[in-house]
Image (cartoon, rainbow, N blue to C red):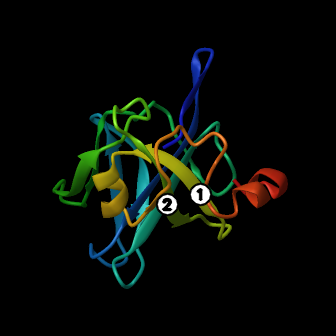
Amino acid sequence: MTPRNNGSRITGFLTVRARRVAAHASLQVVVGGTAIGVLRTNGRGRGLAVFTAPSRRGAQLLPIDPRGRRLSVVGDQGHELLAGEVSDPSTPNGVQCCLDTHGPSGAQRGCDVLLAADCTLAGGTIFGAGRCRPDPCPGAAARSLGGSD
């Protein structure tokens, strides 16, 4: 998540990826007790949901600031399948984490500030302390010039 407070609006993105869950399912994504959208899985039980604010083509609207809030993925019977807390970029001891989270266009989503342990769990690459400005992730210049994000 890379949110920025733009006046009274939040701008940024949130990517939710699931593996080893129900195949061909539509799972509810809940942040801070509020359902924000759907994560659909393929035949192998893998899914990806991208949320943006403001909304962008191919992504679901991110209606609230998820930083520091509980995130869960809920199945059709109301059972929580996955749960965790969304990182907060102001987290002390956060590191620049390059995540290999490919969106609908195939572009890497880039940098997020996470705790080192959370970066490792997410399969990211740590690029040291900082705030992701400028984006240290490989291909960042191409993204900012070509703009698939």
Image side of residue 57 versus residue 92, left or right:
right
* Upstream in sequence: badge 1 or badge 2: 2
Q: Quadrant of residue 139?
A: bottom right
The quadrant in which residue 32 appears is top left
The correct choice, above or below, for 22 with respect to 149 in the image is below
* Residue 148: mark: none
Work out whether residue 131 or residue 11 is closer to the camera in this orientation and state it. Answer: 131
At label 1, the amino acid type is Arg
Residue 79, picture quadrant: bottom left
SS at mark 1 in the image: strand
Q: Crowdedness of circle 1 by 10 Å Cα count: few (<14), some, many (20+)?
A: many
CB within 8 Å, label 1 to label 2? yes
The x, y position of residue 127, in whole percent, is 50, 54
Of residues 65 and 74, the one nearer the viewer is: 65
Q: Within 10 Å of the Cα at label 2, are there few (<14), some (14-19), or many (20+) other Cα atoms?
A: many
Q: Determine the residue positioned at 36% across, 33% down.
A: 91
The image position of residue 108, as x and y in percent, is 61, 64
Q: Residue furthest front?
A: 128
Name the amino acid type tagged 2: Leu
Q: Tell me the distance, in whole angstroms, between the alpha carbons under discs 1 and 2.
A: 7 Å
Give the numbered dot on residue 109.
1
Point out the residue furthest to the top here.
7
Q: The residue tagged with tag 2: helix, strand or loop? A: strand
On residue 99, the disc is 2
Pinpoint residue 43: horizontal percent, then vertical percent: 39, 84
Please determine whether, in this image, residue 75 is positioned above or below residue 2.
below
